[in-house]
Amino acid sequence: MELKKPKAGFCIGVTCPACGGALELESNFFAVTCRFCGSILRVVMPDLPPAFIIPAGKKKSEVRFLVDRYLKENGLPLTRSDFKAQGLYYPYWKVDAILLRVRDRLPEPAPADNSLDMELGMGNLFSFGGESNSSTSVTRIEDRSPKVTLTPQSTTHAAGEARNEIPATIGLRAEYVRMIPYSTENIDDSFTYVPALKSWDQVRAELDKSIRCKTNLDQLQSRHNRTELFHPTGVIVFFPYFICETGTSEGVRRLVLDGLSGRVVHDDIATIHESSPESAPSGAAPFGVLKVELHRCPNCGVDLPATESCVYICHNCHWVVSLEKNYRLQEGMKTVQCRLDPKDTLFPFWLVKIPPKEIGKIVNSPTGTPPSALAIPAFKIANFEVMRRLSKRMTTALISVPTLPVETDNPRFLPVGIHLSEALTLAEMAIYCEQTINKLGTAPPPVILQPQSVALLYAPFHAENYFYVDSVLGAVTFEKGAFDKPAPVIG
């Protein structure tokens, strides 16, 4: 029998709405083909943060054995005949965000003539900043740029009523355990479900307070140091526990077992019997329910391609289908007007029309005419610095590049792998970083982009050696290694 490699990252278990077959969808929430009936499906995210359940890894019949083993290992009396165990699902907020850190560099040595080359380098993954390699002993502190790093940040926070015996976090396990959507058919009636009382607004407020405290501590080392949190998103996760009680000569021993691993996470003696809550407290935080629906054109009902993309063109009615409900392509889809070479690939870019003064924070037009829109890569790039530079170059190139409207799909089109909301977050971080580098010691104001209109532009690039080169201008390039190629067609 061939063993399947476990999926990495957050995944959920759902069923096909057409045939009821089991599906495994990873966290990208794109499209998938049902292996039972062949239906093409996609996940629909609710407006409210969704909720998931982590199925218990231990059965209730195993709990007493696990408790006795723990008691024996610790030299404690084994359970009595009055032993009882109750399954409990406790809610946590799982928060994912991007953490931006600005750190002042140590004084760098500079040449004797007081000149310093401050070209930005590639840096490591999610990091960038200027560095000098001069070996002379003269130092110019005012010329050094800060070091800016971007790292994914994932945390879990207790969302239910405060209980001493329940851990405040479930740690990194929330990144790789299997989860199923919170729904009537997935609820285990043998468990008690503690309602989530902490709202998403409360979680955001706590995160903001934590970041402010972190920045204050950082600035004790240098006034230039700062920490910012971008694009926090949250889901509610119900984690399984077993609340166990057994009598002892001193009172009632109360133990709490991790329902996934069977490990004892709490053990104490209570002179007064404490029972689990029987009724749900009022004021429970609302949450959305994740759904799976057929991946079809909403205009004519024809199946859309099973490629992973955020935007599709229906091959039957040519309707533009966007999977992101909160944004519309007011200006439609465009392509660069040029003769395509056989080796050209059409890469997608979001064109976001914003005030010229906001675009000017990222690019300086050589002609004096501001670009008409901000161009943000709509495909996955593994390095933030590459994305930032490519965005600047393409935004500047828009001044001299003619475009045509797109009416039909093209096999050269690269799938759109970045939702517009995510692209706007990357643009906000790029503007913030640009201001941080240009104005050392000054805290940039918050950046919130409000698009006046949105379009999707496909621009031709071709591979040359280690780079992709703009086929029109021959100048706008990015490294092959930074391009995160899309997954193959699922089916």
Image (spheres, rainbow, N blue to C red):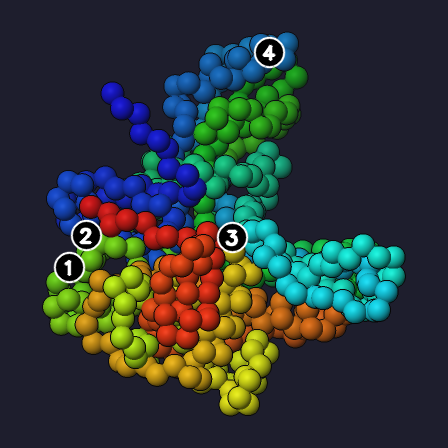
- Mark 1, other Cα within 10 Å: few <14 / some 14–19 / many ≥20: some
Q: Is residue 194 above or below residue 60?
A: below
Query: Is there a contact, CB below 8 Å, between mark 1 and mark 3?
Result: no
Residue type of the residue flagged with mark 1: Asp
Residue at the image point whose x is 51% and y is 45% from the top: 92
Q: Residue at x 74, y 70 (%)?
A: 440
Write down the residue under mark 3.
96
Q: Which residue is mark 1?
A: 303
| Figure check: 259 above or below 483 | above
4 vs 2, front mark: 2
Q: Give me the C-alpha separation between circle 1 and circle 3.
A: 32 Å
Q: Which residue is mark 4?
A: 73
Say which residue label 2 marks. 40
- Rendered view: 253 above or below 68: below
Query: SS class of the residue under badge 4?
Result: helix
If you read the primary sequence from the N terminus, does the residue marked by circle 4 or circle 1 appear first?
Answer: 4
Point 32% across, 49% down: residue: 487
- The answer to which of marks 1 and 2 sits earlier in the sequence is 2
